[in-house]
Image (spheres, rainbow, N blue to C red):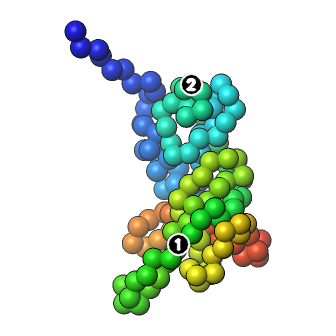
């Protein structure tokens, strides 16, 4: 006998819901109504308690660089960039990049702030900037 899989949610899947919010310029993560923990990457079930009661919330955007590396590219290919792991104030860790400073200047422990930018080649992207740079923006 074959078990039938059912969908634990209705509407678009978690990835599509995250992408749709980002396309509208909003950064959202999930928060579990059962245990109160925040979840990222978008999921159908809470990674902490297994509940399907995940609500979408707008995080503070505050974070700290956990790790960073510089990806080297020729200038004609766009130049160097960094790939960083960011610990959000709400708890989850995510992968992004830190903009606004040279890739080699990104440091572990650096406070950063999330921003949604409009990249001509890739559309809306979630990036982070050093908090001092974020505070200077209107």
The residue positioned 67% from the left and 54% from the top of the image is 88
* Residue 105 % position (x, y): 63, 81
State the residue at coordinates (72%, 76%): 133
Q: Are marks 2 and 1 in contact (CB under 8 Å)?
A: no
Name the residue carrying label 2: 51
**What residue occupies the far left of the structure in this picture?**
1
Which residue is the site of mark 1? Answer: 69
Quadrant of the snapshot with the C terminus: bottom right
Give the image location of residue 56, x and y in percent.
60, 39
Closest to the observer: 23 or 61?
Answer: 61
As drawn, the label of residue 136 is none
Position above or below: 137 against 80: above
Q: Secondary structure at mark 2?
A: loop
Q: Quadrant of residue 38?
A: top right
User: Dot 2: few (<14), some (14–19), or many (≥20) neighbours within 10 Å?
Assistant: some
Q: Is residue 134 among the parts visible in the rendering?
A: no
Q: Is residue 33 left or right of residue 96?
A: right
């Amino acid at each position: 006998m074959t078990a039938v899989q059912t969908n634990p949610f209705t509407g678009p899947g978690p990835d599509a819901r995250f992408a749709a919010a980002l396309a509208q310029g909003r950064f959202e993560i999930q928060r579990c109504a059962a245990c109160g923990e925040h979840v990222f990457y978008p999921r159908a079930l809470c990674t902490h308690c297994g509940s399907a009661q995940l609500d979408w919330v707008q995080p503070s955007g505050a974070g700290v660089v956990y790790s960073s590396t510089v990806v080297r590219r020729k200038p004609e290919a766009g130049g160097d960039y960094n790939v960083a792991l960011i610990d959000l104030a709400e708890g989850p860790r995510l992968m992004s990049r830190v903009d606004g400073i040279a890739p080699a200047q990104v440091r572990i422990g650096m406070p950063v702030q999330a921003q949604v930018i409009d990249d001509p080649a890739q559309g809306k992207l979630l990036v982070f900037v050093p908090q001092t740079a974020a505070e200077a923006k209107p």
